[in-house]
């Protein structure tokens, strides 16, 4: 009798696992585990596209290297059985149907474009991690109720353009911004298979996505310093950027007395210091950077007549950014008087609004990690992410994994395979829980 009962139970379990619908309910979820070595191999393979002889990668959005990297990701998506499409903003969307195809999809992903001479992990971990989740689900015979969408956002660096388009926030001015590739965003979107004239068709409205999740390297050193493997992001900073032009007067460097110069580069030096001073003399975690500068005519024996440079400010509060900018403008005005130059600030339409992550998603990620025996830390993100745009249309959360040495946007960027695996494992479990209704119970 006992033997019969056991045999029957075994049969029922086997039968359940062979029926896709039942499998989605019965498969033993705690056994789902991402493969860190497989992720690492794919990350290194992707790093071949745009490999920089100085180390790291230069896979700047819209360039040939970006296009090659995207082609590699599309081939991986197809191998994993995803239906691939490119939306009019150039976002790559790989879809796996659910048992209830009418449900709004659970979406997850990140970006594969990089800064010039950047690292191999920024963004890439979220894309390769998303594909790993799909593979792990498939290996366990799990079909979710909701459709799943892996999203590779276009042109994240320098403007979050793909996700901005997805929430309908790209202005005509943003399309005219000259990107790091030298192409305008409009030209670039075309180069990667999008259609800037049809951007409205890329828009996803609130309710159309059940939840959005982004796995990402921390890009700072907190998790490593604390010895904690998983970060739960509380909120993501807003980012405002300006082109600054300083107009002085180019003149002979030998014959023009020091008190008769209108040296644009000296004025720029003062402005750079002023940005640093303004940002550091008020309490808080705000940051400000001048990351780009060019002086004209750029000759050893000519006083610089014109300087073009950038200013970028970041904080979790949009009002704080506004206040800091006002103070920088006042300082710039004083420099104009002192140095006989004119300083013009032009906002670059490549901004990101600050965003809090959804409290239910944050709790779910934290609980999931703890159930898997992984310690968690809540922390803000000083880097911009597509998740901050997606947060405007869907319950959104971000999972961070440690960056060795806190290094990012640099060739030395590195995250260990076991941390990659932990992050993707938390991601896949969180997806399964959301699929089973965890957010409506929170
Ligand atoms: C994106 O990586 C940013 O924070 O600039
Ligand atoms: Mn990134
Ligand atoms: Mn980045």
Image: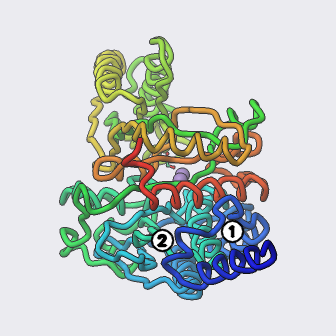
- In the depicted structure, whether residue 200 falls above or below residue 417: below
Coordinates of residue 110 in the picture (x, y in percent): 50, 60
Badge count: 2
- 296 or 135, nearer to the observer: 135
- Residue sitting at x 56%, y 66%: 130
Asked if the residue at tag 1 contacts the one at tag 2, i.e. Cβ–Cβ closer than 8 Å, the answer is no
- In the depicted structure, whether residue 39 falls above or below residue 269: below
If the image is split into quadrants, where does the C terminus sit? top left
Please, what secondary structure does the residue beneath circle 2 have? loop
Coordinates of residue 243 in the picture (x, y in percent): 34, 43
Please, what secondary structure does the residue beneath circle 1 have? helix
Alpha carbon separation for disc pair 2 and 1 = 26 Å
Q: Which residue position is annotated with label 2?
A: 144
Q: Give the image quarter of residue 275.
A: top left
Coordinates of residue 432 in the picture (x, y in percent): 53, 61
- In the depicted structure, whether residue 5 falls above or below residue 217: below
List the single residue furthest toward the front.
Answer: 1
**Left-right relation of 129 to 277:** right
Label 2 neighbour load within 10 Å: few <14, some 14-19, many 20+? many
Q: Which residue position is annotated with label 1?
A: 43
Q: Earlier in the sequence, mark 2 or mark 1?
A: 1
- In the depicted structure, whether residue 306 falls above or below residue 29: above
Q: Is residue 288 visible?
A: yes
């Amino acid at each position: 009798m006992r033997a019969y009962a056991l045999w029957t139970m075994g049969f029922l379990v086997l039968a359940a696992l062979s029926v896709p619908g039942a499998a989605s309910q019965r498969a033993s979820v705690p056994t789902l585990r991402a493969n860190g070595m497989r992720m690492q191999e794919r990350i290194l393979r992707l790093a071949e596209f745009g490999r920089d002889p100085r180390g790291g990668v230069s896979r700047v959005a819209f360039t040939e290297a970006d296009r090659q990297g995207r082609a590699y990701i599309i081939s991986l998506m197809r191998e994993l059985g995803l239906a691939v499409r490119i939306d009019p903003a150039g976002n790559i969307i790989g879809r796996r149907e659910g048992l209830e195809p009418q449900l709004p999809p659970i979406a997850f992903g990140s970006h594969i474009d990089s800064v010039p001479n950047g690292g191999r992990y920024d963004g890439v971990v979220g894309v390769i991690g998303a594909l790993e989740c799909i593979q792990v689900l498939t290996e366990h015979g799990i079909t979710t109720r909701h459709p799943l969408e892996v999203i590779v956002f276009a042109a994240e660096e320098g403007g979050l353009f793909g996700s901005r388009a997805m929430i309908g926030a790209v202005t005509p001015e943003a399309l005219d911004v000259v990107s790091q590739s030298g192409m305008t965003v409009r030209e670039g979107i075309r180069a990667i298979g999008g259609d800037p004239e049809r951007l409205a068709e890329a828009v996803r409205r609130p309710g159309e996505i059940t939840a959005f999740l982004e796995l990402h390297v921390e890009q700072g050193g907190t998790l490593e310093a604390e010895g904690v493997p998983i970060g739960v992001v509380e909120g993501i900073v807003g980012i405002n950027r300006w082109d600054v032009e300083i107009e002085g007067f180019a003149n002979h460097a030998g014959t023009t007395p020091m008190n008769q110069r209108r040296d644009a580069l000296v004025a720029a030096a003062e402005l750079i210091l002023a940005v640093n001073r303004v940002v550091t003399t008020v309490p808080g975690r705000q940051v400000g950077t001048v990351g780009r500068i060019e002086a004209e005519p750029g000759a050893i024996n000519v006083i610089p007549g014109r300087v073009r440079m950038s200013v970028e400010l970041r904080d979790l509060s949009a009002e704080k950014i506004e206040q800091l900018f006002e103070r920088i403008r006042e300082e710039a005005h004083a420099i104009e008087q002192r140095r006989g130059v004119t300083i013009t600030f032009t906002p670059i339409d490549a901004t990101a609004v600050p965003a809090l992550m959804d409290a239910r998603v944050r709790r779910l990620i934290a609980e999931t990690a703890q159930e898997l025996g992984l310690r968690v830390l809540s922390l803000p993100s000083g880097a911009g992410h597509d998740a901050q745009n997606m947060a405007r249309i869907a319950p959104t959360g971000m999972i961070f994994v440690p960056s060795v040495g806190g290094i990012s946007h640099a060739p030395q960027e590195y995250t260990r395979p076991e941390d990659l695996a932990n992050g993707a494992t938390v991601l896949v479990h969180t997806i399964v829980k959301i699929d089973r209704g965890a957010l409506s119970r929170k």
